[in-house]
Image (cartoon, coloured by chain):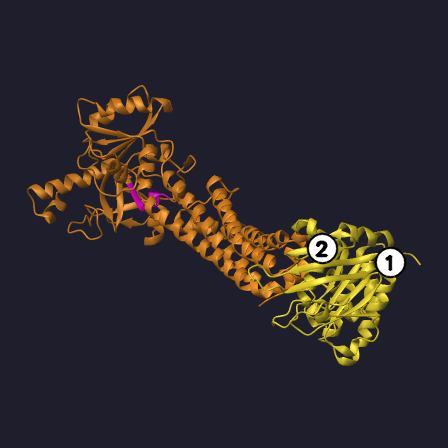
Amino acid sequence: MSKPKPVIEISDLQFAWKKQAQLVLDINSLQVNEGERVFLRGPSGSGKSTLLSLLAAVTAPRSGDLKVLGQDLKKLGHAKRDQFRADHIGFIFQMFNLIPYLSVVENVTLPCRFSRKRKHKVLAQADSLEHEAIRLLDHLDMAHDDVLHKPVNELSVGQQQRVAAARALMGAPELVIADEPTSSLDADRRTAFIDLLFRECDSANSTLIFVSHDNSLEAPFERTIEFNQLNNSVADKRPKLRAVS
Amino acid sequence: MAIVELAIKSFRNRKFTTGLTVLSIALSVMLLLGIEIIRQGAETSFTNTLSGTDLIVGARSSPVQLLLYSVFHIGNPTNNMQWHSYEEIATHPQVKWTIPVSLSDSHKGYRVIGTTEQFYEHFRFADSKALQLEAGNWFSGTFDAVVGAEVAQALGYQSGEKIILAHGAGDESFITHSDKPFKIVGILKRTGTPVDRAVYVGLQSIDVMHDEFNGAAHNHDPLMAHDQHNTEKSNRKSSLSAILVGLQSRGAAIGMQREINEYKTEALTAIMPGVVLLELWSMMNVVERILVIVSGLVVAVGLFSMLIILMTSLNERRREMAILRSVGARPVHIFTLIMGEAVFLTLLAMVLGVAMVYGLLFLVQPWLESLFGLYVVIGWPNATELMFLMIIALCGFVVGLIPGIRIYRYSLADGMTIRV
């Protein structure tokens, strides 16, 4: 078996919001390899979103190493980090993922407008961005005429989340980060959504980081990370436990 | 460019408020340009009250006063000119034509002007337009009169009608020449100048009326003077109020003006009408400036309302900005998005405003001309108007900076997470 390619490599990472002395993140080490599906569990407010911001190159660590796809993010300036995100990362929010004044297809093709790499990836295989968008939407059961041309505001939450998934997968980004994407879905739809996500990540060979506090969704994931064990930074003064990763 | 497309599409689901903003700015642009165009039309109409006349000569007085009574029939000369001065000027080699003018009486509030057929022949206005008769002919007999278009319209006169003239300006007069009516032999076409508001008779007719008045004032009972009235054409050379002069060459005007001003035999003033007209117009400048300032304020209010709309929408759009950041947009992209919206709205409003002002002017131009004698030229925007438009565009840009910088800072601080 070939050596697994690391997609995320973290060591001795520390992060705090500018003026605070209190560390929000203090992670000894974390490694995620290509193709893994990771369930990142932790309660709300524990700093998960902050970690995701770092992984998505929106913010930079105060100290420590952070490499995504082999790229040391600390070495990149603001503009390059934004470009890196555009090129390699697909992101799904918990809700309100879509831009209200764009159509469904326009929302899905959005990443390709900011990343020439992703655009070329798509055009290498499909006739046009629109075609690829519709193909993805079709896999997510969103390509019917009656939903495809609906104004985004009129879609149900479940439909919106599926469009968001299509957008995150557009152009086969290497890393897909989903921040509690099923929290606003009905319970019975959650598993179906995860199945769709898995299938698409498989065909694109993308690595998936799925953040949630809902334990019932854990089952399909091959790997679970407890955020509170990962993150050493705690508010109280109890002696810190070293994280076992 | 992705961001520009996004900016344009962002109006899709805010059509109503966007439309209102654009309309309010467009209306204010229309107001500003409309005022400027009409102002120019008014200035042109005013300075074109008289054209082709090189000099106006009268007894010594201030230039503005001479212009006012000789062209606008406002006020009176302090002194009359002597006839022999007129003869000397008329026979001067540099002089091509002259029009003698005598101001005195009034008819129901409209000035009666004594002149000759030279007035009909040589008088020009606007862009060298000549006088034309709507009906009838120019006067020839002592008791013939020709009336201007407004006089005929307001008093309902027809050709052939008899009218009574009174001595001294003003509506009511205690002396009337009721048994010596004048006959209207001609009605002039509308000119949009003071000619429309005048009654023209022969110089000798003025003399006849003056003789009568002088006779009555000196010795006789006013009513008795009527019985002694001589209906024969008087041969006495009359006193003049002013002379309009056309020269052989335009360039001779300054020399001729000086010559007349230094005339030894009689104290005279010669003016170049174009110069004095502009002087008179500039006195009314204050009103124009106020109008421009007011309409400038209206534009400012329109732009301010756009600012308010952009700023109040910022908070709602922070979510949208987080989404854009998550797909790789940079804070400068987000800044450009907002700026682009402000600039696009302003430009759209400007185009709409310009279209509206020209559309409106096309509609009302004939009315302005016939009702107010105001000839408005509809052509490409001139330098002043272009300057106004550029200033508005610049202001729109500056207005866009304010929410632009704010959202730049927001997106920098928020990243992908919103802490609202």
Residue B106 screen position, x and y as percent: 23, 46
Q: Which mark is residue A4?
A: 1
User: In this view, which residue lies farthest toward the right?
Assistant: A1
| Residue B162 screen position, x and y as percent | 28, 49
Would residue B358 be seen by someone viewing this image from the given angle? no
Q: Which residues are magenta?
A: B193-200
SS at mark 1 in the image: loop
Identify the residue at horizontal 53%, vertical 64% (top origin). B312
> Which residue is disc 2 drawn over?
A65
User: Marks 1 and 2: which is nearer the front?
Assistant: 2
Q: Position of residue B322 (x, y in %)?
A: 65, 62
Q: Chain of mark 2?
A: A
Q: Is residue B143 left or right of residue B316?
A: left
Whole-percent x, y for residue B279 in the image? 31, 37
Rendered hue of chain B is orange
Instruction: Look at the image and say whether residue B372 sits in the magenta stretch.
Output: no
> Residue B199 magenta-drawn?
yes
Does residue B390 show up? Answer: yes
On screen, residue B266 versus residue B410, left or right, reads left
Depth check, front residue: B170 or B14:
B14
Residue A227: which disc?
A: none
The number of callouts visible is: 2
B283 versus A82 height, above or below: above
Whether callout 1 and callout 2 share a subunit is answered: yes
Q: Quadrant of the C terminus of chain A?
A: bottom right
Residue at point 37%, 24% (across, down):
B250
- In this view, the residue farthest toward the front is A239
Name the outermost residue toward the left. B219
Compared across the picture, whether A27 is left or right of B234 comes to right
**In the rendered image of this protein, which colour is used for chain A?**
yellow
Q: CA distance from mark 1 to mark 2?
A: 19 Å
